[in-house]
Amino acid sequence: MADWFIATEGVKVVKDSASLWPQIITAVSSAGAALFGVRMTHYFTGKREREAAEKKIKQARQFISIELVFLLEKFAESCSDVAADLGEDEDEDKDIDGEFLQHTFVPTVDFPDLSFKDVSGDWQVLDVRLMYRIRELVVLQKEAHKDIAVAGYAAPDGERKEYFRERRYQYARLGLKAIIQARRLRKMAGFPDTPLAVSPLSAQPVLWDVWRKERRRRAKQAAEERKMFADPNYPENLEL
């Protein structure tokens, strides 16, 4: 009797369970759909936030790039004026009755100022290496002025060829460095290429020509000095 009762109840449970399956499947499907919906909502919300953040960074980069590009290119143009300056004779009209007068050449162009204190954009949106190279220009200009001062001290009068040669070389180097960083900023921000290279008289070709010629002269001079110092007849190499 007991066995019959258990068997009968078992059949009822199986029948009841079978009738619940559609409800179970529906409930599971609803839960899965809800979970999927939550995940998709989070995904699209996160995507919109990322796109908004990227757009903000892009706009910040473009803003500071506008400031820096024109500042650097203005500085580079001024550098090209210094690089092309051969000086003028300040005593040209001071000869007295044909007497000999020591003529002294002086610059016709002043050194340009370079300062980033008025840049209001966010530097942190720039690549660290790019930011470093741009800010480094101020330090390089100070070092260049020291080298120019040494050359000027060694030749205070006359044509002062070494002084003007050092002056032109240092500012050709600074101007080219400024143009390189301006080009990188333009590329990063999606701006057109620099207008400083459109003709042979533009700043970049002028700077490049001065820098290239002086580098060759210095390399030749260094080679001659090494050859001279290696000569066994050079005074310092003689055994006394």
Image (spheres, rainbow, N blue to C red):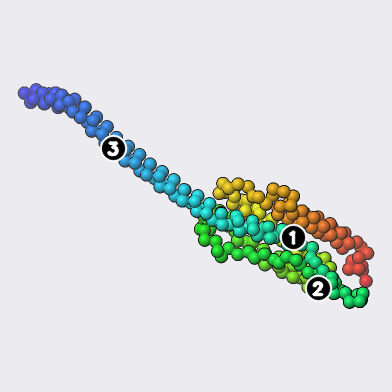
Q: Residue at x 18, y 28 (%)?
A: 20
Task: Tell me residue 147's x, y (percent).
Answer: 74, 67
Q: Hey, what amino acid is under mark 1?
A: Ala
Q: Is residue 23 left or right of residue 32?
A: left
Query: Which numbered mark, 3 or 2, is in the foreground of this view?
Result: 2
Q: Residue at x 66, y 54 (%)?
A: 179
The N terminus, quarter of image: top left
Please report whichever mark, 3 or 2, sits nearer to the chain's N-terminal start.
3
Query: Which numbered mark, 1 or 3, is in the foreground of this view?
Result: 1
Please report whichever mark, 1 or 2, sits nearer to the chain's N-terminal start.
1
Report crowding for label 1: few under 14, some 14 to 19, many 20 or more residues within 10 A (C-alpha): many
Report crowding for label 2: few under 14, some 14 to 19, many 20 or more residues within 10 A (C-alpha): few
Residue at the disc numbered 2: 156
Q: Hey, what amino acid is under mark 3?
A: Ala
Residue furthest left as drawn: 1
Mark 3 residue element: helix
Report crowding for label 3: few under 14, some 14 to 19, many 20 or more residues within 10 A (C-alpha): few
Residue at the disc numbered 3: 34
Query: Between residues 186 and 47, which one lies in front from this camera angle?
Result: 186
Please report whichever mark, 1 or 3, sits nearer to the chain's N-terminal start.
3
Q: Residue at x 69, y 55 (%)?
A: 176
Residue at the disc numbered 1: 83
How many numbered markers are drawn? 3
Q: Is residue 10 left or right of residue 196?
A: left
Q: Residue at x 85, y 74 (%)?
A: 94
Marks 1 and 3, Cα distance to the nearest angstrom? 71 Å
